[in-house]
Amino acid sequence: MSTVVDRGLEGVVVGSTALSNVEGAIGCLTYRGYDIDDLAPNATYEEIVHLLLYGTLPNRHQLEVLKRELGSCRALPEPLVNAMQNVPKTAWPMEVVRTVTSGLGLFSPVNANGEHMSDVHTAIELIAKLPTIVAAWDRIRRELEPIAPRPDLSQAGNFLYMRTGKVPHAVEEDAIDTYFVLLADHSFNASTFAARVAASTRADMYASVTAALSTLQGDLHGGAATAAFRTLNEVKTPQNAEPYVRQVLERGQRIMGMGHREYKVRDPRARHLEAMAKALDSHVEGERWYETAHAIEEASRKVLQEKKPGNTIYANVDFYTAPVLADLGIPGDEFTCLFACGRIAGWTAHILEQLADNRLIRPQAAYDGPPTGPYVPIEQRSGNGVRG
Ligand code: COA
């Protein structure tokens, strides 16, 4: 019997969700029926957290309650901060964030069976604490003392405050807030799927989020923004964009931050991030990234169309993340951590959705190894890879 294998599960529907919908053919993303184009300029990240976790946009009272809860659980357990102080300063930020997030489980209460809660309050705790981990490591690796979180600031404002000790300019806070809104959820992307697979085994929320963080790390997923920033640094000026793109494609490599499994037109989040990158370039001092980023996207489209007529390629969410976060002074190797600080709302909402109607996720594989044969005793093994 022959089995059709969809490599990378492309086009395979593996479950259902009411949280978000990606319409790749028309470039549309919605969270619980609200278009990201409406949410990005109008809603705060806290409103999105409420929408994803509780199912509705909050009224003023609900929003205040949520903000109070987020503000009250931002601080990290002291032993985890001490442990971070002992990590080699060269550690990759995503490794630290993944490890410390997993460690949070060690300090969370357990029930009579020794199990952690995996409820909406655990979700809020994880959403609140993730930016604290990122900011604390940012300072510790620069030999600076971590700054305690402030309960009165927004998720975005508090994150920037914990990096510098200064309440950020409204333009900068808004930029991070919108970035978090844009990144909050994206249907069954690889990291969210990993979280749901872990949750489906009844692993707790700390373990499931750790699985998601591990999956986000790679540069075909959340690691692409860091890779896109490396590209920006190599290209440096708009004039270098086309020769660079030609070289990369000639070598059969990819332009990081370009292309998407689902979007056949431009990723709608890229449009918002591009506008932000353009606006921030004129707000901040120092290196300006937007023009170079735009030139790389244009060159990629042109060169790819020359090489494969009819094919086109667009920026995905990670591409313009690079100039936006660089303009805000975030180091390139922390970009994936920032992605996680936004996506944690989606991950936890998906875990809750999975648990509410759980069935173990356990797909099949088409076996293409050798046929079944007898066990070969060690004295009879040839050692040349041939059976027997
Ligand atoms: N640069 C150059 N060519 C690209 C490309 C890129 N960034 N992304 C896709 N392509 C090309 C592939 O080479 C392939 O060409 P081929 O059919 O001639 O072999 C074709 O487009 C399809 O690519 P494929 O890898 O099969 O698509 P996918 O759905 O598995 O890949 C990504 C999706 C995201 C993994 C892919 O676009 C990519 O590697 N992008 C760069 C990493 C990135 O930005 N990731 C973040 C995603 S949000």
Image (tube, rainbow, N blue to C red):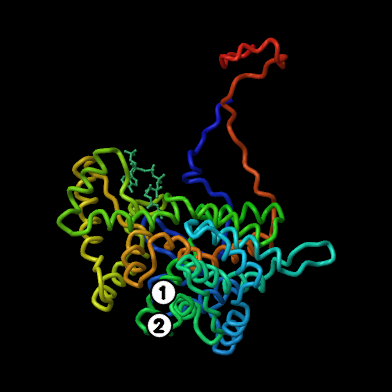
Q: Taking 111 as reference, is 90 left or right?
A: left
Q: Nearer the viewer, residue 244 or 362?
A: 244
Q: Nearer the viewer, residue 343 or 48?
A: 343
Mark toward the viewer: 2 or 1: 2
Residue 196 picture location, percent across and down: 61, 55
**Residue at 43% over, 78% down:** 164
Report the residue that reaches farthest toward the bottom. Answer: 61
Q: Secondary structure at mark 2?
A: loop
| Label 1, ligand 1: CB separation under 8 Å | no
Amino acid identity at mark 2: Pro
Q: Is residue 292 above or below residue 164?
A: above
Quadrant where the C terminus is found in the figure: top right
Q: Which residue is mark 2?
A: 168
Report the residue that reaches farthest toward the right. Answer: 112
In which quarter of the view is residue 36 placed?
A: bottom left
**Residue at 50% over, 84% down:** 153
**Residue at 24% over, 50% down:** 300
Q: Residues within 10 Å of mark 1 (few under 14, many from 20)?
A: many
Residue 297 picture location, percent across and down: 25, 56
Residue 99 picture location, percent across and down: 59, 58
Report the residue that reaches farthest toward the left. Answer: 239
Q: Residues within 10 Å of mark 2 (few under 14, many from 20)?
A: some
Tell me, for residue 135, which label it has, or none: none
Q: Secondary structure at mark 1?
A: helix
Quadrant where the N terminus is found in the figure: top right
Report the number of numbered marks.
2
Q: Which residue is mark 1?
A: 176
Mark 2 or 1 closer to N-term? 2
Badge 2 vs badge 1, beta-carbon distance below 8 Å: yes
Q: Nearer the viewer, residue 361 or 377?
A: 377
Amino acid identity at mark 1: Ile
